[in-house]
Amino acid sequence: GGGTAVAVSAGLKKDAEAAQGDKRGRHRGDGASDGRAKRARYFKKALTSRDKQFGTNQRGVLITCGQREESQCTKEAIVLFSEYAERLHPEFFAEDEPASGASDKAKELDKELATLRKKKDTSNAVFSSFNVGVHSTVFIRFEKEELDPVQTVTSILDDAKTSGQGKCRYCVRFIPVQNSCYAKIEDATEMCRKLAQQNLPPVEGDVAEEKSPKFAIVFRKRNNSTADRDKFIESIAKAMPQGYKVDLTKPDWVLAIEIMRTTCCAAFVQRYHELGKLNVKTIIEKYHQNSVEGAAEKVPDAAEKTAGPPPASKDQEKAEGLEDPSADKVATNPGPASKNDDGAVNREVTETADTSREEVHAQAAQPEPAQGAEKASAQGNEGTEKAS
C-alpha cells in the first residue's frame, strides 16, 4: 500500500512537471516560432525580389538621396534619364503609328492598347530600378547598350552648371557605373584593367612627366567591413596603362570605385572636380555663389562711371594752363599807375598807405566828451522843452 502511494505521488509529480514544462515551452515556442516565421518570410521576399539581380556585370547610375526618400528619388531619376535618353536616342521612345485611314477613336484605342502592352512587356524597358541594400542609395540600370551612363551623367551636370538648375529635388549625387563585380581585390583589379583599356587612350612613345596624362582613384565603401581601402587602391593603380601618372589635385581621369555590401562598381570619369564631384547640389550652389560675386564686382564699376573724373588740383590747372588769371589777383593797386614807371607805382602805393595810417592816428587822438557836459546839455534841452 505504501509503495503504491509513493509511486502514484511520484507519477503525479512528473505529470505536473511535464505539464508545467509544456506550458513554458508552449509560451517560449510561440514567440520563437513567430520570429522564425517572420525571418523566413523576410528572406523569402528578399530572394524573390529584384535585389538579387544587383551584382556583377551591371551598367547604370548609382544615385544618393536623403533618408527615406528612395522611392521619390527613383521616380525622379527615371524621368530625368528618360528625358536625356530621348535627346540622345529618340528611337527608343518612338511610338507605333496606327494604320492610315483609321478614325480618331480607332487611333486613340490603338494608343491605349500600345501603352498597356508596354506596361506588361518589360523586355523593351529602357531603365530598371533596384534597391542595392544601402540606405539613401538607389541604382538605375541601363537596359540598352547604346546608352552610356557616363555621357548621361555628364550631360545632366553640364546643364546644371550652365543654367544653375538641377531639374531634380531628391537626387544628390550621380555616380556612373560602367561595370560591376564581386568585391574582391582580384576581381576588381581585372575589371578596372579592362575598363582602362576601353576608356583611356594609349600613350605612345616617351612623354615628359609634365605632359603625361594623369589619373586618380576615388574609393568609397558602404556596408562592407572586409574590403581594405589601401590594398584595393594599390592593386588597381598597378593595373593602369603605362604612361599614366597619379595626380590627386588635377587629374585628367578619375576612377570612381563604389563598394556596397558584396558588389564593387567602377567607372572612368573626366572633369571630376569641375563637375562638383558628381554632386548636382554643389554645382548649383557654386553657380549662385559666382553670380552673387559677379554682381558685387559690377556695382563699384558702375559707381565710378556715374561719379566721373575727380576735380583737378591747382598744380594740374597751372600745368595745363586752365587756371583763372583773375583768381590770384587781389586789389593791390589802389589807384592808377604808369605801366612804364615802376618807381611811380611804388611811390603811389606808399603815399596811399601813409595817408591811411595818419587818418587812423587822428581818429584815435580825438578826446571823448566829458560826462558832465553831456549831462548839462541834456538838462538844458529838458528846460527848453518845458518852457515851450
Image (spheres, rainbow, N blue to C red):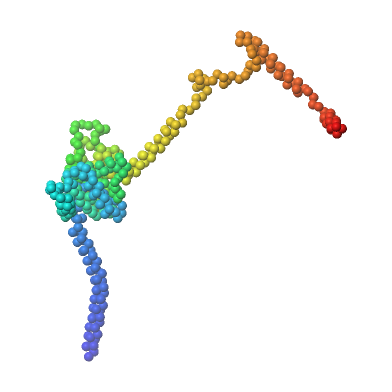
> Residue most toward the right?
387
- Tell me if residue 67 can be seen: yes
Report the number of discs: 0
Residue 121 versus residue 228: which sits nearer the camera?
121
> Residue most toward the bottom?
1
Task: Give the residue at x 22% y 62%.
Answer: 42
Q: Position of residue 297 (x, y in %)?
A: 40, 35
Task: Give the residue at x 50% y 25%.
Answer: 312
Q: Is residue 6 above or below residue 131?
A: below
Q: Position of residue 248 (x, y in %)?
A: 29, 40
Task: Give the residue at x 71% y 19%.
Answer: 357
Image quadrant for the C terminus? Answer: top right
Q: Position of residue 346 (x, y in %)?
A: 65, 13
In this image, 160 relative to 380: left or right? Answer: left
- Tell me if residue 118 can be seen: no
Q: Is residue 43 above or below residue 281?
A: below
Q: Toward which corner of the image does residue 298 lie, by quadrant?
A: top left
Image quadrant for the N terminus? Answer: bottom left
In this image, 324 relative to 91: left or right? Answer: right
Residue 161 versus residue 32: which sits nearer the camera?
161
In this image, 312 relative to 230: left or right? Answer: right
> Residue most toward the front?
388
Q: Is residue 385 above or below residue 178?
A: above
Task: Give the residue at x 25% y 76%.
Answer: 23
Q: Position of residue 385 (x, y in %)?
A: 84, 32
In this image, 246 relative to 328: left or right? Answer: left
